[in-house]
RNA sequence: GGUUGCAUAGCUCAACUGGAUAGAGCAGCUGCCUUCUAAGCAGCAGGUUCGGGGUUCGAGUCCCUGUGCAAUCACCA
C-alpha cells in the first residue's frame, strides 16, 4: 500500500538521481519516531556508497525528488541520515476508504497449505493447571493465526491416557476408593482422580520411609516399595488386556474426560481430532525396523536399538528397548507418520514446553534421516515455563494453580469490577453473566498471551486480575466504547461514505490511527511466521491505545463537515473491526457494551 | 561437568530483526468527568540494557569473554 508506493518511488529516485537500480525489497521503510514530523522514515546510511554524498545531502536530494515527482508526499525533513516523510491528508483518507471498502481486509487468501497444530496434551491423572493454560491458549491462538494467514488448519489433542502414572491413581482408587464417583463426591471427575493420584504419592512415600528406617538404601527403597511394584504390575495387566483392569481404566478415564470437556468448554477451546496414546503407543516399531534396514539405526549387543546423531551434533539416542518395548521416541516417530497419513500436512506444529527441546530436536533429526519428505515442516513451538512469585509450581508442595479455580476467580473478579462501575445495571442477568465470562477469560488469555512464547514468564495473581492498563479488558473496553459511537452514529443516520477530497486537514491522531490500521496485515503475517500470538496481542493493544488518544482529543459528533464526520465514523468502524478480529485470533471475544 | 536458552525502569513486559534521545503497563506524584463509556486521557519522575572487550557510519540486538539464573543430558514421559 503506501509503504510499497514509497519504496517504488524511492527506487525510481535512485534510478534517476544516481543511475542506480535498487529493488524495492532492498529499501526498508520504518515508522518515524514520534518526536519527528512524518510517518515513514527512509534510512540513507546504507546507500552512501551509491549516492556518493553526505547523509544529509543525499537525504535532501531524495526528499526533494519525492516531493516533486509524487503526489502523496506533503513534506519531508532530514535529521542526520534519516529522511522523514510526511504524507498528504488526502492520501490517508484514500487509504482508509480503500481499506473500509475491502471486506476481506486483514485475512489472507488460502495458500493451499495444510498445517496441523498439536497442543494441550494432558495426562488423565490430574486436572489442568496454569501451565496447561499457557499451552492451550498458545496452541489455540496459533491455530487461529495460521488459519487467518490462509492455511488449512487442523487442531489436535494427543492425550496421555496410559502408563505407570495413570496406574498409580487407579491403584489408589482401587484400594481406597470405596466406590466413590464424581457424583457422590460432588466433584469434577478430573479433580477426583487427581485426588487419588496424590493419595498414591502419600502411600508410596510412607512405604519408602518405612523401608529406609528398616535399613534399606533409599534408592533401592524407591524401586522396592510395594505400591510402585503393584502399579507396574497393573500396567502389565493393562497391556495384556486384563478385563478388570481395563474396565477400571475406562471408568476412571471417562470421568476425567468429562471433567476436561467442561474445562475446555469454559475456555472456549475445541479440537478437530483427539488422539489417545493408548491407541498410538505401539506405533513406531515398524519405523525402527525400517531404520535398521536403511542403516540409520543400529543394534547394540543386548538387542536395544539406537540412532547415532553425533554428526548432527547430538548424542546417541535409544529408539527401542532391549526387551522390544517402545519408548517415548519410538511412539513419537510413529505418531508423526500417522498424523501425516491422516492429514498430509505441509507443516506440523508441536506446542510443548521448552523442557523438551532436546527431544524434539532429536525426533526431527530422526525423521529427516528416515527420509520423510515432510520432516522439514515439523516445528516445535517451544514455550517457557510459567513461574509463580513463590517460584516454580510444584504439585507435591501444593503450589499448583488449578485451571478451574483460576477461571472461576477471573469470572468473579470481572463481576466485582463491573458491579463497582455500575455501567450495565439495565442489562439482563444472563447477558451480564455472559459478559463476566467474556471479560474474565479475556483478562486471563491476554495476560498469558501477551508475553513472547519463547520466554519464561511470571504469573503474578494480583496482576492477572488487574483490568486496567496493558490488559485484555482495556482492549475490550475500547471496543465497547467504539460500539457506543457506532450505535449513536447509526441512530443519527450519519452517512457512511465520504469524499476523500473533502475531509480536509487531519489531526495527527487520525493519521496515527490510520497508519496503525495499515499495519495490521504485517502484524498478522509476522505472528504466523514467528508462531507468536504475542505479536498480535501487542498490535491490538497499540491500536486500542491509539484509538483512545484519538477519542479523547477529537470529538466526533461535533463535526459539521459531513464528509469528515463520516470519515471519523469510518475510522471508528475500522478500528472496532480490527480489534474484534485481532482479539478473536487470540481466542478472546469483545463485548458491545461493558 | 557438556549442551541449549535467558539477563532491559522498583516490578511485569516491548523495542518492526543492526538505526535517531531504549518504549508501554503496574506501583509513586500532578491534572482532566454539566459535551460521544474515566475499565479512559494528558503530564512528572524513574535506565551504565548483568560486567568486560571487539566488529562499523551506527550495537539492547552480531562476535569473544566473565558472572548469575533456568532447562536438559534415563532402556521416564
Image (cartoon, coloured by chain):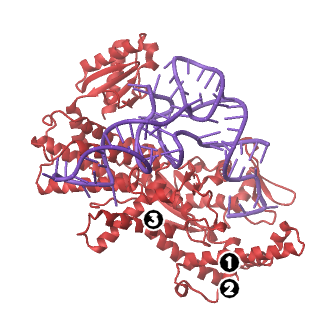
Q: A504 or A525: nearer the eye?
A: A504
Q: Secondary structure at mark 2?
A: helix
Question: Please, which chain is the residue tagged with disc 2 on?
Answer: A
Circle nearer the viewer, 3 or 1: 1
Q: Which mark is residue A220?
A: none
Q: Earlier in the sequence, mark 2 or mark 3?
A: 2
Q: Is residue A392 left or right of residue A42?
A: right
Q: Which mark is residue A199?
A: 1
- In percent of width and height, residue A247 lies at 63, 84
Q: According to the rendering, which colour does chain A have?
A: red
**Tag count:** 3
Quarter of the picture holding the C terminus of chain A? bottom left
- Residue designated by label 3: A269
Above or below, A305 relative to B67: below
Q: Which mark is residue A176?
A: 2
Circle nearer the viewer, 2 or 3: 2
CA separation in Å, label 3 and label 1: 30 Å
Amino acid at each position: 500500500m503506501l509503504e510499497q508506493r514509497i519504496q517504488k518511488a524511492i527506487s525510481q529516485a535512485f534510478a534517476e538521481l544516481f543511475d542506480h537500480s535498487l529493488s524495492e525489497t532492498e529499501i526498508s521503510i520504518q515508522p518515524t519516531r514520534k518526536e519527528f514530523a512524518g510517518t515513514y522514515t527512509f534510512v540513507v546510511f546504507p546507500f552512501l556508497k551509491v549516492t556518493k554524498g553526505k547523509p544529509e545531502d543525499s537525504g535532501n536530494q531524495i526528499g526533494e525528488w519525492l516531493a516533486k515527482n509524487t503526489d502523496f508526499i506533503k513534506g519531508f525533513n532530514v535529521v542526520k541520515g534519516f529522511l522523514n516523510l510526511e504524507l498528504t491528508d488526502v492520501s490517508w483518507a484514500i487509504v482508509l476508504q480503500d481499506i473500509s471498502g475491502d471486506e476481506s481486509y486483514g485475512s489472507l487468501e488460502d495458500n493451499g497449505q495444510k498445517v496441523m497444530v498439536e497442543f494441550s496434551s494432558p495426562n488423565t491423572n490430574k486436572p489442568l493447571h496454569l501451565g496447561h493454560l499457557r499451552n492451550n491458549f498458545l496452541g489455540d491462538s496459533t491455530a487461529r493465526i495460521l488459519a487467518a494467514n490462509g492455511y488449512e488448519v487442523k487442531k489436535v489433542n494427543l492425550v496421555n491416557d496410559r502408563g505407570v502414572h495413570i496406574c498409580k491413581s487407579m491403584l489408589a482408587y482401587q484400594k481406597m476408593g470405596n466406590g466413590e464417583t464424581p457424583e457422590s463426591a460432588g466433584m469434577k471427575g478430573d479433580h477426583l482422580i487427581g485426588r487419588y493420584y496424590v493419595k498414591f504419592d502419600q502411600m508410596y512415600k510412607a512405604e519408602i520411609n518405612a523401608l529406609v528406617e528398616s535399613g534399606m538404601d533409599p534408592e533401592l527403597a524407591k524401586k522396592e516399595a510395594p505400591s510402585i511394584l503393584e502399579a507396574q504390575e497393573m500396567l502389565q495387566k493393562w497391556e495384556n488386556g486384563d478385563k478388570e483392569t481395563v474396565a477400571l481404566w475406562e471408568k476412571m478415564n471417562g470421568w476425567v474426560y468429562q471433567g476436561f470437556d467442561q474445562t475446555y468448554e469454559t475456555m472456549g477451546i475445541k479440537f478437530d481430532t483427539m488422539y489417545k496414546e493408548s491407541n498410538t503407543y505401539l506405533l513406531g516399531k515398524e519405523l525402527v525396523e525400517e531404520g535398521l534396514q536403511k542403516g540409520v539405526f543400529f543394534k547394540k549387543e543386548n538387542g536395544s536399538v539406537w540412532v547415532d546423531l553425533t554428526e548432527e551434533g547430538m548424542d546417541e539416542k535409544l529408539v527401542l528397548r532391549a526387551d522390544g518395548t517402545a519408548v517415548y521416541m519410538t511412539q513419537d516417530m510413529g505418531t508423526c507418520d500417522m498424523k501425516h497419513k491422516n492429514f498430509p500436512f505441509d507443516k506440523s506444529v508441536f506446542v510443548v514446553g521448552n523442557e523438551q527441546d532436546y527431544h524434539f530436536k532429536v525426533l526431527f533429526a530422526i525423521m529427516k534421516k528416515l527420509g520423510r519428505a515432510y520432516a522439514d515442516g515439523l516445528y516445535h513451538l517451544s514455550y517457557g515455563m510459567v513461574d509463580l512469585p513463590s517460584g516454580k509450581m510444584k504439585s507435591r508442595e501444593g503450589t499448583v494453580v488449578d485451571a478451574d479455580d483460576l477461571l472461576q476467580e477471573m469470572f468473579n473478579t470481572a463481576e466485582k469490577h463491573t458491579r463497582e462501575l455500575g455501567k450495565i445495571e439495565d442489562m439482563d442477568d444472563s447477558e451480564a453473566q455472559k459478559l463476566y465470562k467474556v471479560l474474565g477469560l479475556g483478562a486471563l488469555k491476554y495476560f498469558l498471551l501477551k508475553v513472547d512464547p519463547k520466554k519464561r514468564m511470571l504469573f503474578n495473581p494480583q496482576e492477572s486480575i488487574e483490568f486496567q492498563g496493558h490488559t485484555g479488558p482495556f482492549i475490550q473496553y475500547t471496543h465497547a466504547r467504539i460500539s457506543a459511537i457506532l450505535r449513536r452514529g447509526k441512530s443519527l443516520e450519519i452517512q457512511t461514505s465520504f469524499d476523500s477530497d473533502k475531509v480536509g486537514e487531519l489531526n495527527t491522531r487520525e493519521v496515527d490511527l490510520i497508519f496503525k490500521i495499515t499495519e495490521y496485515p504485517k502484524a498478522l503475517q509476522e505472528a504466523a511466521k514467528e508462531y507468536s500470538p504475542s505479536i498480535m496481542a501487542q498490535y491490538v493493544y497499540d491500536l486500542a491505545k491509539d484509538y483512545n488518544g484519538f477519542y479523547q482529543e477529537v470529538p466526533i459528533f461535533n463535526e459539521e463537515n459531513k464528509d469528515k464526520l463520516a470519515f471519523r465514523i469510518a475510522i471508528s468502524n475500522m478500528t472496532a473491526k480490527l480489534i474484534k478480529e485481532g482479539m478473536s485470533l487470540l481466542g478472546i471475544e469483545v463485548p458491545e457494551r461493558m
